[in-house]
Amino acid sequence: MPNAKSDLRKMTIELNEELIELVDVVDESDSVLETRRLDECQRLGLLHRAVTVFLRNSKGELFLQQRGKNDDWLPGYWTASCTGHVKSREDATKAAKREMEEELGISCEPSFLFKFVVPTVKFMDKIERELDIVFEATSDDLIHIDPREVEAGTFMSIAKCKEFFNAKKNKITLDARLAFERYVSINRL
């Protein structure tokens, strides 16, 4: 039978895990080298895993999101449907699903597409070096964006996405631009 002390300990551990996000440092072939705090990886420019999800509806339109304007990483920039870091020992598919639930308020099964190393990006005092694991998902569920993480979002046809990526390339995250180019190429869109 649970007691108040064990419940408090469990809540403290969960809170600490949220405050101190642990990620796996990997090499370019995705072998785990060690576990570090995310903020250390971003301070030292250590390669770690991230996920990108391209969400399409049954019309074939792709959802793009604008990052929150108060975000500490590229605020107000446009990106893929959702993105995020893979926690230490977390399966990338579960991370993609978690990010869709957190940022878009939907639950569906993502399908793995490809992975690649994103060139190093520096912003303010952070150095982001990611092994990006890219997924695709399809859903017609109503999207409920989390206003703490997402400023705006919209579905667009692939043709409109291509125009958008060309017109706004300086306001779209590098990982999203590179992943979208490969996504379009692989799917022959």
Image (cartoon, rainbow, N blue to C red):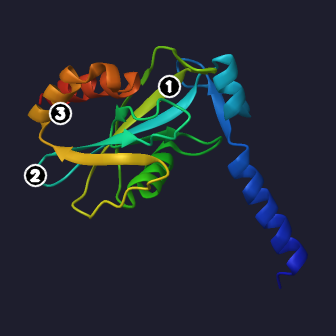
Pointer 3 local density, CA inside 10 Å: few below 14, some 14–19, many at least 20: some
How far is disc 2 from disc 1 in space, using C-alphas?
30 Å
Task: Give 32 or 146, whichever is nearer the viewer.
Answer: 146
Residue 105 visible, this orientation? yes
Q: Which residue is under mark 2?
A: 59
Task: Give 40 or 22, whichever is nearer the viewer.
Answer: 40
Q: Are marks 2 and 1 in contact (CB under 8 Å)?
A: no
How far is disc 3 from disc 2 in space, using C-alphas?
14 Å
Q: Quadrant of residue 46?
A: top right
- Say which of marks 3 and 1 sits in front: 3
> Furthest-top residue in view?
119
In the image, 176: left or right of 50? left
Q: Which residue is under mark 3?
A: 161
> Furthest-front residue in view?
69
The kind of residue on which mark 3 rests is Cys
- Residue 78: image location, x then y, percent: 34, 34
Task: Give 164 or 31, whichever is nearer the viewer.
Answer: 164
Pointer 2 local density, CA inside 10 Å: few below 14, some 14–19, many at least 20: few
In the image, 142: left or right of 96? left
- Residue 41: image location, x then y, percent: 67, 25
- Say which of marks 3 and 2 sits in front: 3
Residue visible at 77% across and 65% down in the picture? 11
- Residue 23: image location, x then y, percent: 65, 36
Q: Quadrant of residue 20?
A: top right
Residue visible at 44% across and 56% down in the picture? 146
Quarter occupied by the C terminus: top left
Q: Is residue 144 above or below residue 96?
A: below
Quarter occupied by the N terminus: bottom right
Label 3 vs 1, first from the N-terminus = 1
- Judged from the image, the secondary structure of the residue bearing numbered disc 2 is loop
Q: Which residue is under mark 1?
A: 131
